[in-house]
């Protein structure tokens, strides 16, 4: 199999080097960083359409600065507020809302590149429709590939368009794979910082607090992804993403703990060569790479090799971090299992952040939901969303926030323990 059979490495690159960009998640960190790249290279990039969240103030600022043709807000209330702000300024921007608005943003006929950065499954339908519309897509949304990677990559293959990872680890893999062919790859190595509990004894996990779990030693991220990093579920999601993006089975995707987070990923080839990607820890760099692929542009984002003192590596402890093992098992099954993995994790992490359950209850909740999920394979985005809703309902019952009075009264510990022992 050559690189060209992989959706990340399309048969042909576009002869049009200019990128007319639609951004799903323009008011989030990836969206804001993307707009910084657009500003730095005005001769190469322009903004066509934006899908924002509920941040009306920032969406208004973006409309004034970029004058997009279309903007969609998460809710109709937010859209109405934005229209009211734009009206006296005579800024001609069409303002929509909800999932239908996001799809319109992603499929705008003038856009030829879509940055998918809406957090969660909220961006799933719009991302899939962008691929169906023949757009090149830069992916910064883990949930899209975890929940519906089989559908999205299958459609990308049919369209012959690239899925370019913006997530730093997969972006690094993509860069390394350009040094060989896919059939020459023996292993992909995803590096993990190890999170805040890398050296914490298992006996102390039951007492881990929300504040401790949010204190990541390397990165400053949103709350859910920070907790996912603490449980190593974030790395588990990345394993599934790598399987989908690079058409590799789970046993060829390896995780290795690298506390310095200097090497973002590595690719090992059949002759024993290992290519590693190093760069500054700035998301603008993988965004720039995705936007300009297969070219590279000069940038100020340089890595200081003289500051590199040491590189440490260790195997992950699956017993202390069972979320990673659960992710590998879901990756092997695919389909509904990966949908349920993501949905159960989101519910469990939210419950932990709300102090409803303990840190160790996160993997227990996920395992219970996976055990109750049939190994089916959805054939449409609508079916993916249905499976997602079902898994969330089960998880909510398990953690005690759902509609099942029996589960709620018994509490999460007895429910999960009972499910595991049945």
Image (spheres, rainbow, N blue to C red):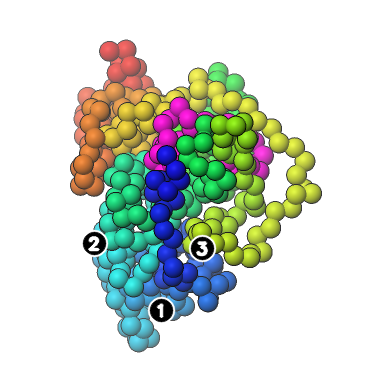
Residue positioned 34% across, 76% down in the render: 69
Which residue in the protein does label 3 denote? Answer: 292
Mark 2 residue crowding within 10 angstroms, few (<14) / some (14–19) / many (20+): few
Q: CA distance from mark 3 to mark 1?
A: 22 Å
SS at mark 2?
helix
Residue positioned 64% across, 51% down in the render: 279
Sequence-wise, the earlier of marks 3 and 1 is 1
Against 226, is 254 above or below?
above
Left or right, residue 263 beside residue 113: right
Residue that lies at the very extreme toward the top in this rendered image? 421
Sequence-wise, the earlier of marks 2 and 3 is 2
Foreground disc of the pair 3, 1: 3
Which residue in the protein does label 1 denote? Answer: 67
Q: CA distance from mark 2 to mark 1?
A: 21 Å
Residue positioned 64% across, 47% down in the render: 278
Whether residue 74 appears in this view of the structure is no
Magenta segment range? 238-265
Q: Which mark is residue 100?
A: 2
Q: CA distance from mark 2 to mark 3?
A: 29 Å
The quadrant in which the N terminus is found is top left
């Amino acid at each position: 199999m050559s690189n060209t059979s992989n959706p990340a490495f399309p048969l042909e690159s576009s002869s049009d080097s200019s990128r007319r960009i639609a951004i799903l998640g323009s008011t989030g960190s990836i969206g804001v960083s993307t707009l910084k790249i657009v500003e730095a290279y005005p001769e190469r990039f322009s903004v066509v359409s934006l899908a924002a969240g509920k941040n009306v103030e920032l969406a208004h600022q973006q409309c004034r600065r970029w004058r997009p043709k279309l903007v969609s807000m998460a809710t109709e209330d937010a859209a109405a507020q934005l229209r009211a702000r734009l009206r006296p300024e005579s800024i001609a921007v069409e303002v929509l809302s909800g999932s239908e608005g996001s799809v319109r943003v992603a499929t705008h006929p003038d856009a030829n590149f879509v940055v998918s950065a809406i957090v969660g499954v909220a961006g799933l339908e719009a991302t899939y429709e962008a691929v169906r519309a023949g757009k090149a897509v830069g992916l910064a949304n883990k949930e899209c590939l975890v929940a519906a990677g089989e559908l999205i990559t299958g459609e990308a293959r049919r369209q012959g368009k690239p899925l370019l990872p913006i997530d730093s680890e997969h972006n690094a893999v993509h860069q390394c794979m350009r040094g060989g062919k896919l059939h020459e790859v023996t292993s992909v190595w995803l590096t993990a910082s190890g999170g805040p509990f890398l050296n914490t004894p298992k006996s102390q996990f039951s007492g881990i607090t929300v504040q401790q779990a949010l204190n990541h030693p390397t990165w400053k991220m949103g709350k859910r992804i920070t907790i996912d990093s603490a449980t190593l579920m974030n790395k588990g999601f990345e394993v599934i993403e790598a399987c989908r993006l690079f058409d590799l089975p789970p046993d060829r995707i390896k995780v290795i703990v690298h506390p310095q987070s200097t090497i973002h990923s590595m690719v090992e080839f059949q002759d024993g060569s290992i290519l590693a990607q190093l760069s500054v820890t700035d998301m603008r760099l993988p965004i720039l790479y995705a936007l300009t692929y297969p070219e590279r542009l000069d940038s100020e984002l340089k890595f200081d090799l003289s500051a590199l003192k040491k590189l440490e590596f260790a195997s992950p402890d699956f017993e202390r971090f069972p979320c990673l093992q659960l992710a590998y098992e879901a990756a092997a099954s695919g389909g509904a299992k990966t949908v349920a993995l993501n949905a159960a994790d989101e519910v469990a992490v939210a419950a932990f952040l709300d102090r409803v359950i303990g840190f160790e209850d996160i993997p227990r909740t996920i395992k219970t939901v996976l055990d109750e999920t049939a190994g089916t394979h959805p054939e449409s985005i609508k079916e993916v969303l249905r499976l997602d809703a079902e898994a969330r309902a089960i998880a909510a019952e398990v953690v005690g926030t759902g509609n099942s009075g029996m589960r709620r009264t018994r509490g999460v510990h007895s429910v999960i323990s009972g499910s595991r022992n049945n």
